Image (tube, rainbow, N blue to C red):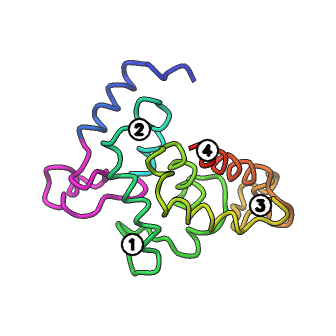
Amino acid sequence: MGFRDDIRLLEHINVIFDSQRLDGGWHCALSRAKGNRLQETESCPMDNLNILMLLGQYEQFRNAPRLHGAIDLLLNHWERRNEKHRPYGFGTGSDYSKLKYPAVKYNILRVLDVLSLYPYAMKSVIFANMLDFVLKKAKDGKFFAESISKSYPEFDFGQKKEPSRWITFLILRIQNRYNQK
């Protein structure tokens, strides 16, 4: 949108890096921020996801070792899905595992899409397991919305009866990135 190199955005990215926590992630709660009383608690999965989504738009950050902690937190969150592990209220249960769009909530499709921007993530067996979990949902090579928002009935991802071209596109894009790693 023309703001990629805007100095204000680059200054904000520096603030983001300055607020990175001890575990390599981020957290929106001030009491859990770097230097505060709860700084040693696990970072927030949604905050990590949002920041990785932003930084993944910049080629220079896609291979940055500094982001491995946040990536590992998201991968390990999936790996621990059978445990009662809900960092800051975010779980990886049945709702997380449903194919749905728009990707504004914390779910497997959004996590895979963001992590597929990072070669480090795609080298992980956990990433491969997540992708395999999603690919097994295909019906004749197409994917259906498994959960819908009633706000989008006119879109293909807003109904469950027909395959969603958009969800199919997203999954194929993730798979393509993975195959090119």
Q: In the figure, is residue 153 to the left or right of 85? A: right
Query: Which corner quadrant holds the C terminus?
Result: top right
Q: Is residue 115 magenta?
A: no
The residue tagged with tag 3: helix, strand or loop? Answer: loop
User: Which of the pair 29/84 is nearer the observer?
Assistant: 84
Q: Nearer the viewer, mark 4 or mark 3?
A: 4
Write the residue at 56% across / 54% down: 112
Which residue corresponds to mark 1?
86
- Disc 4 marks which residue? 177
Q: Residues within 10 Å of mark 3 (few under 14, many from 20)?
A: many
SS at mark 4 in the image:
helix
Q: Please name the residue shown 48% across and 63% down the image.
A: 126
Q: Earlier in the sequence, mark 1 or mark 3?
A: 1
The residue carrying mark 2 is: 63
Name the amino acid, label 3. Phe
Region rendered in magenta: 19-46
Residue receiving disc 3:
143
Q: Residue at x 72, y 68 (%)?
A: 137
